[in-house]
Amino acid sequence: QEHEPAYFYVLDEVDAALDKRNSERLASLVRRYTDKAQYLIISHNDGVISEADNLYGVSMDNNGMSKVVSLRI
């Protein structure tokens, strides 16, 4: 990010293969850069989710329609 920074980053399950400790370290690393850019992280990992400012969940209802739930932390 420091060489050619962007304003927005999307990280799709980059933590999938990480254990709890390394997931928390990743979340801490991303947190340090949030004053310079925005991050959208797709994750199922509690260690990463716990560092979020906003959470968005997407699920499917019985009719096959997507439902979005948001939570500001």
Image (cartoon, helix red, strand yellow):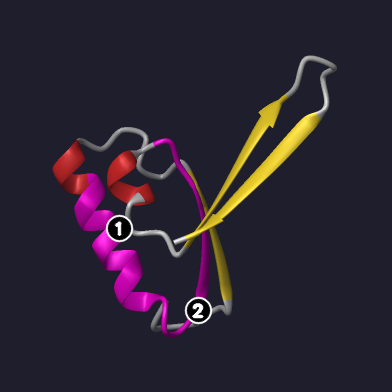
Q: Residues within 10 Å of mark 1 (few under 14, many from 20)?
A: some
Asked whether the residues under the numbered discs 1 and 2 touch, taking CB atoms below 8 Å apart as contact, a structural biologist would say: no
Q: Is residue 65 above or below residue 33?
A: above
Q: Where does residue 60 sit, x and y in percent of width and height? A: 72, 24
Q: Amino acid at mark 1?
A: Ala
Q: Earlier in the sequence, mark 1 or mark 2?
A: 1
Please, which residue is most extreme toward the left here?
Answer: 21
Q: Where does residue 1 sit, x and y in percent of width and height? A: 42, 76
Which residue is painted at 26% across and 38% down in the image? 18
Q: Residues within 10 Å of mark 2 (few under 14, many from 20)?
A: few
Q: Secondary structure at mark 1?
A: helix
**Which residue is nearer to you in this view: 60 or 2?**
60
Which residue is painted at 45% across and 84% down in the image? 36
Q: Secondary structure at mark 2?
A: loop
Q: Is residue 69 above or below residue 55?
A: above
Q: Is residue 35 left or right of residue 70?
A: left
**Residues drawn in magenta:** 23-44
Q: Is residue 43 left or right of residue 33?
A: right
Q: Is residue 37 left or right of residue 30?
A: right
**Which residue is nearer to you in this view: 68 or 13?**
68
Q: Is residue 12 above or below residue 53?
A: above
Which residue is painted at 27% across and 66% down in the image? 29
Q: Amino acid at mark 2?
A: Ala
Image quarter where the C terminus lies is bottom left
**Residue highlighted by disc 2:** 37
Disc 1 to disc 2, how far (Cα)? Answer: 14 Å
Q: Where does residue 9 sit, x and y in percent of width and height? A: 54, 65
**Which residue is nearer to you in this view: 19 or 52?**
52
Which residue is painted at 83% across and 27% down in the image? 65
**Residue highlighted by disc 1:** 27
Q: Where does residue 62 sit, x and y in percent of width and height? A: 78, 15
